[in-house]
Image (cartoon, helix red, strand yellow):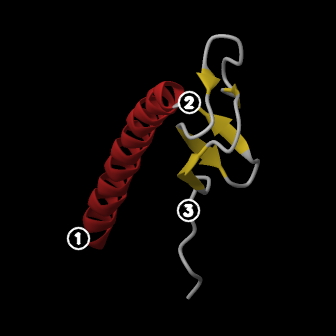
Amino acid sequence: MAKPKSLILSMEITTAGHKHGCRHNRRKHLLAKGDRRLTILSENHHYCLACAKTFLTNDIGRLQKLLTEVEALEQTRVSKNEISQN
């Protein structure tokens, strides 16, 4: 059986090594050396914690909606299989 895959990008909280801007809003969200930030490892993009929190909150909501839809579709499929077996 194949190993389950993840649809979520590899990311982690890292420390800025030098001053730079947040990938989402470079002018208003500056990261100083030593600031904690969200790093998307596959793209090497860095986001301030405020932007990271917004992205993660929105994405958790989107994932929860998709999960609810998948569960409903599975339930419908199970119900149809039970009916066809009778």
Mark linked to residue 86: 1
Please give the residue where the numbered disc 2 appears in the rendered image: 48
| Amino acid identity at mark 1 | Asn
Q: CA distance from mark 1 to mark 3?
A: 37 Å
Q: Position of residue 76 (x, y in %)?
A: 32, 52
* Contact check, label 2 and label 1, Cβ < 8 Å: no
Q: Identify the residue shown where x is 63% and y is 42%.
A: 16
Mark 1 lies on a secondary structure that is loop
Above/below status of 26 relative to 77: above
Q: Earlier in the sequence, mark 1 or mark 3?
A: 3
- Say which label, 2 or 1, has the lower sequence index: 2
Mark nearest the camera among 2 and 3 is 2
**Residue 10 pos. (x, y %):** 61, 57
In the picture provided, is 34 more to the left or to the right than 68? right
Q: Which callout, 1 or 3, points to the residue nearer the camera?
A: 3
Cα gap from disc 2 to disc 1, whole angstroms? 57 Å
Please give left or right for residue 74 compared with residue 31 in the image.
left
- List the residue tagged with mark 3: 6
How crowded pointer 3 is (Cα within 10 Å; few <14, some 14-19, many 20+) is rated as: few
- Rendered location of residue 22, percent (x, y): 66, 26
- Quadrant of the frame with the C terminus: bottom left
